[in-house]
Image (tube, rainbow, N blue to C red):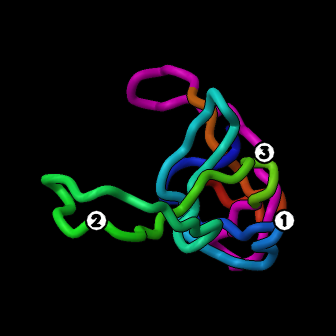
Amino acid sequence: MHVHKNDTVVVIAGNFKGKQGKVLKVFPEKNRVIVEGVNVVKRHTRPSQKNPQGGIMQKEAPIHASNVMVIDPKTNEPTRIGYKHVTDPTTGKRKAMRVSRKSGEMF
């Protein structure tokens, strides 16, 4: 999946197009992500131990991962993500690193 937790992303399609936020949670099996401040829905909740008052709660709902694009840390613009295999000099193991297609920056 091209999006990881704590990535800064911009929404490129849907009702929240153009909004930016941090990825709070990733659901790889469903190909969905929860982005901070995006797709906020209202839920009616009953009184409970955790929330004795009850009432209407607001929380972010998941959106499809194809509708978000990672922000390049170098240029602060949306970019596609590529992968580059790098060999770790200490252990000798190969590791896939994410690479920005715009700037070539690894992250």
Q: Are marks 2 and 1 in contact (CB under 8 Å)?
A: no
- From the image, tell me which residue sits under label 3: 82
Labels 2 and 1: the sequence-earlier one: 1
Q: Position of residue 26 (x, y in %)?
A: 55, 44
Q: Kindly identify the amino acid type of the residue bearing the numbered disc 1.
A: Gly
Q: Position of residue 17 (x, y in %)?
A: 81, 74
Q: Position of residue 94 (x, y in %)?
A: 57, 23
Disc ID at residue 14: 1
Q: Position of residue 8 (x, y in %)?
A: 59, 67
Mark 2: secondary structure: loop
Alpha carbons under labels 2 and 3: distance apart:
45 Å
Mark 1: secondary structure: loop
Q: Are marks 3 and 1 in contact (CB under 8 Å)?
A: no
- Give the class, few, some or many, for how many residues have Cα within 10 Å of label 1's Cα (few <14, many ≥20): few
Mark 3: secondary structure: strand
Q: Judge by depth and name the residue closer to the eye, 30 or 95.
A: 30
**Magenta region, residue range:** 69-94
Labels 3 and 1: the sequence-earlier one: 1
- Residue 38 lies in quadrant: bottom right
Indicate whether 93 appears above or below 89: above
Screen quadrant of the C terminus: bottom right
Q: Is residue 72 magenta?
A: yes
Q: Judge by depth and name the residue closer to the eye, 47 or 58.
A: 47
Disc ID at residue 54: 2
